[in-house]
Amino acid sequence: PPRLLHTVTGTLCNRDTQISHFMGSQQYNQLQSSCVTCDPDQRMKLIHTEVLRYFRFVKLSHRWGEAEPSLRDIEGRSIYDMPPKGGLRKLQSFCTVVCEWDYLWAWSDTCCIDKHSSAEVQETIGSMFAWYRRSALTIVYLSDVPDTGSFGNSEWFKRGWTLQELLAPRAILFYTQNWLPYKNLVSSNHKTDATVLDELERATGIESQFLTNFSPGTDDARSRLQWASLRRTTRPEDIAYSLFGIFHIHLPILYGESVENALGRLLAEIISQSGDISVLDW
């Protein structure tokens, strides 16, 4: 993603600033020293490995609440120095948890996107599945699940965008309303926990093989549409846009069009790619 939150300082960084952080880091100095004694092939492999490790990022999946901080709200400031109210408290807690997991970079859709730029919004929606897939970890914050409760009835499972945020990541951790790990499970990935997987299957109607190893595309498109059939989005047309990544389809984002038109364009593209007309009866 073009912008990430630096979890140590709490500042929003563009790519140039991210690179500056790296070049001023201990990891960069160690890399330079190690490269001196390497042959060219080893050097390139080492650089690739260390750069990827340094820039690992964690994404937040959540339901939007009141007073969510925007890019304009936090730009040029540390989120840790701002009053812990509403969505800002959530963002601070998220970055703190990410830092505790020893990751330097975090991403939230509330403040890491310039929503005043239609081009950036278009790029972000088109890249969202890939970004969640490439994340080192996705943290799901369930604001409506008590620390000792079960997540089956959480609103998170009823929202349109959270479907790809569940399917795309390789690793997910669920956190309850007070930022405690779900059921206090000690795990680096709840997708590998049999108890959580069983609950996820019941909550979503999606088989565990797809929850743990989902491949985007138009295979069995009707089933994928049915997974989304009971989910809702704030903007009606988003129910179609939220599925673009799941079907690995690239279409223009046309906010203001009717939901019927948005879904029609999606279904037409699915049929064009797969030849499966059963999607018309989902």
Image: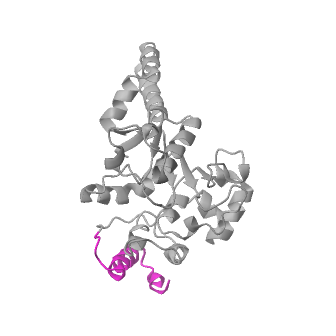
State whether residue 57 is above or below residue 128.
above
User: Quadrant of residue 21 in the image?
Assistant: top left
Question: Residue at image x 29%, y 70%?
Answer: 255
Task: Give, as a single range, the part of the protein colored magenta.
Answer: 254-282
In the displayed structure image, the side of residue 16 where residue 81 appears, left or right: right
Q: In the rendered image, is residue 136 in sight?
A: no
Residue located farthest toward the bottom when viewing the structure as drawn: 281
Q: Position of residue 26 (x, y in %)?
A: 46, 20
Q: Position of residue 282 (x, y in %)?
A: 50, 83
Of the pair 79 and 113, the residue shown nearer to us:
79
Q: In the rendered image, is residue 131 in sight?
A: yes
Question: Is 181 in the magenta?
Answer: no
Question: Residue at image x 39%, y 78%?
Answer: 267
Of the pair 129 and 88, the residue shown nearer to us:
88
Question: Residue at image x 30%, y 57%?
Answer: 115
Q: Position of residue 139 (x, y in %)?
A: 56, 50
Question: Residue at image x 37%, y 24%?
Answer: 23
Magenta-drawn stretch, dominant element (helix, strand or loop): helix
Q: Position of residue 226 (x, y in %)?
A: 53, 77
State whether residue 149 is above or below residue 33.
below
State whether residue 77 is above or below residue 229.
above
In the displayed structure image, the side of residue 158 where residue 21 appears, left or right: left
User: Quadrant of residue 203 in the image?
Assistant: bottom right
Of the pair 165 and 218, the residue shown nearer to us:
165
In the displayed structure image, the side of residue 144 where residue 27 appears, left or right: left
State whether residue 91 is above or below residue 21.
below
- Looking at the image, how many numbered discs can be counted on the residues? 0
User: Quadrant of residue 76 in the image?
Assistant: top left
